Structures are given as C-alpha cells and as structure tokens.
Image (cartoon, rainbow, N blue to C red):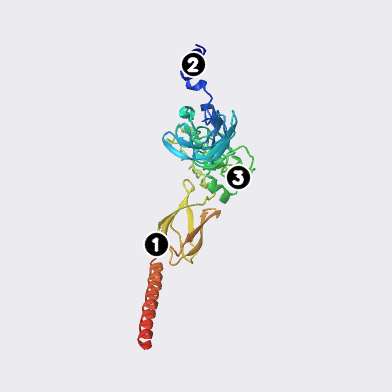
Amino acid sequence: MKKSFLSFLTALFVSVLLALPAGAQQIQYDLGIRTSDIFFSRPADQLIAGESVRVYGRIHNEGTADVFGFLSFFQSEQIIGDSQVVSVRASGAEEEAWVDFVVPQTAFNIRAEIRGTSPQDQNPANDVAVSSMYTPIVDADGDGVADPQDNCPSVVNANQLDTDGDGQGDACDADDDNDGIPDASEGAQGTSPTNPDSDGDGVADGQDLYPTDPTRSSAPPPPPPPPPPAEQPSSPEPAAEPPAEQSPAVNVPAEIPAPAATTAEETPKIEESAFRITVPAIASVLYRRKAWNVYEFEATSLEGVGDITVLWRFGDDETSAERKITHRYRRPGKYLVTLEVTDTSGTSARDQVKIAISFFNPENPTLWILVGAIVALGLGAIVTARVLEKRKAKGSL
C-alpha cells in the first residue's frame, strides 16, 4: 500500500514538472537580446547619412552556464556584418558586440541575431531583436550641417558664414557682400569682397564710380547751359520836322530831312561747351577650354563703360585686342593670361588667370607619337632578344 502511494506521488510530481511552461524551467544554455539592446556610437537622432558609425548589440545570458556566441547585424534583409565572438557568463551577465556601419540616405531599421553559440543555444525564441525605424540626417557635402539647414548644401562650410545675410553662404555665394560686383572682380578693382562699401562713403561699391575714393562716388555734374542772349532794344524812329512856314510871296516847300540811318548791333556769339563723363575701366576674364590646347577668352564687366581698349597677353608671346577670342597654344605648359582694359581717360584695369596645359592628355598627338615610339622600341628589344637566344641555342648544339 505504501509503495503504491509513493509511486503515485512520484508520477504526480513528474506530471506537474512536464505540465509547467518551458519558460518556468531553468535552461542551461540560453543567450538573449531585446529591442532596447540595439544602439549606436552616437545618438540615434544625430545619425548623418553617409557617415560611418558603430552599431552595438547587448547580449544577455539567461541560462545557468557560460556560452560563446556572436551577433549578425542586418539592415532590413541586407547583412551589415558579423560581430566579434563574445563569451557571456551565466546567470544574467551581459556583453556588447558591434560592427561598423555606414548610415544610409533613407529611413532604416536594424535587426540583430545571435548566432554561433557554443554550446548550442537551447532557447532560440529570444535570439532575434529588431529596432525601431531611424531617419538619418541628409548632409550631401559632409560638413556636419543637415541639408535643410545648410546655406551651401553642396559645398563644405561648417561655419555657415553668410556675410550679406541673403541665405546663401559665402562658400557658394558669387557676391559675398551683395554690392553688385562679383567677388572674382573685386580684387582687380581693389575693393573688399566682404564690405559692400569699401571706401566708406555711404555708396555701395556697385553704384560707386570711384569705389576706392571716399571723396567722390559719381561723375561731376555737367556745366550749366549759357544764358540766352539779351534782347536788343530797337532804335526809335526819329520824329519828322514840321514844315517850314511859307512865304506869301514865294511858294517853297519845306525841306524834309531824311531819317537817320540806324545800325543793328551784332548778335553776340555764343561759344558751345562740351563735357564727357569718364567711367573707370573694369577688367574681368571669362574663359573656358574648348580642346586640349584651345581656350576661349572673353572680357566681361564692360557694359556701360563706354569706349575702351582691350589688350590680351596669353603668356606665349601672343597678344590680341579683341573682346572675345579663341586662342590655341602650341605646346604644353603653364601660362599666365593677362587682360588689360583702358578707358578714354587713360584709366586702366587688369585681371589675370592661370592656364595649365598638360602634356599627358589623350588629345595631345605628341603623346601618342611618344607612346608609339616606346612601344616600337620595346617590341624591337623583345624581337632582338629572342633572335639572340635562338642563335645562342644553335651555337650550343
């Protein structure tokens, strides 16, 4: 009777153990990871597209024995890489594993999966974790400023300097001070590219005919027109003399004197005066390459200047007086191109650009001739060597 009762209790105990859920039983080998265990080397809201960061995963040991393993990281279904192998101590200990990761241009999430456990993981239910969605900051020029806030999104300018406050940073603004003169031309005129009124006379450089002279800013006014000639008064008609009394004996008519001749005064001669407004010359070079050794040059910023003389010096002893000209260089090298313009008052301005024509250009026919000669010499040397080897082999026989 006692044996039967003991057998009943044993069977009941075993049945209870088997009826318990798997989670209620202590597992020996069990590594796990949660969603909150995925993080980056910088805050998630500061991830910049195209930047290399480190993504981490925190592995927990939920079992009773030490276990080796590693993490595989995925961006959606595309694998990023496998972490280093880590050893996690038993009973709740944790270790961090990581891989390097380039932040994509669009929203993404990270999946971390525990793999390669040794001994074999007995509870795969907690081996995978998926993060929430992350939206990276787009920064095309990589200067650390997001494109929506970057005043030069395609040019590196971490300081975001905007001298004229027009919303376009100095790094990509052709006219930093917004005075109407391009920065590239201000140096030739002696004006400041960051000060709209270089001479401090209260007139912006673009409207100042003398932007480096604080004592004047516009052409002198024309002289006043001469006054009209004074109207000459007409000479009065002389009064006629009364006829003389006639003698009763003699009927003699009275002598009527002839009126005095009057001379009209000459109208005063008015001298005409002329004046000319001289506008200072402004020199600016615009150029573009049309072929390996052919460039097109144009003198710009000449509108409204009036009659000017243009002189080009191309740095190869060639010159031209055309405002726009195409010039061919005869040989490779570095050339300093100078544009000098002179206005009717003798005022001149100058601008210069540097042109470099490389010898190693596929369009250079001399390069191909040289390459052909080297190849021919090389082939000749190979043929000669083989002929000598054959002769030597025949001689040894």
Label 3, residues with CA under 10 Å away: few <14, some 14-19, many ≥20: many
Q: Please indicate, yes or no, whether residue 221 appears anywhere in the rendered image.
A: no
Give the percent coordinates (x, y) of residue 222: 54, 42
Does 395 appear above or below 166?
Answer: below
Q: Say whether marks 1 and 3 touch (CB < 8 Å).
A: no
Name the residue beneath numbered marker 3: 192
Label 2, residues with CA under 10 Å away: few <14, some 14-19, many ≥20: few
Sequence-earlier tag: 1 or 2? 2
Mark 1 to mark 3 CA distance (whole Å)? 41 Å
Q: SS at mark 1?
A: loop
Q: Nearer the viewer, residue 321 or 395?
A: 395
Q: SS at mark 2?
A: helix
In front: label 1 or label 2: 2
Name the residue beneath numbered marker 2: 7
Does 359 appear above or below 120?
Answer: below
Q: Nearer the viewer, residue 371 or 311?
A: 371
Q: Say whether marks 1 and 2 touch (CB < 8 Å).
A: no
Mark 3 to mark 2 CA distance (whole Å)? 104 Å
Q: Nearer the viewer, residue 53 or 356?
A: 53
Say which quadrant the C terminus sits in. bottom left
In front: label 3 or label 2: 2
The amino acid type, in three-letter code, at marker 2 is Ser
Name the residue beneath numbered marker 1: 362
Sequence-earlier tag: 1 or 3? 3
Mark 1 to mark 2 CA distance (whole Å)? 97 Å
Which residue is at a point 39% across and 80% down the rendered structure image? 385
Q: SS at mark 3?
A: loop
Q: Which of the labelled discs sits on residue 48, or is there none?
A: none
Q: Please indicate, yes or no, whether residue 374 appears anywhere in the rendered image.
A: yes
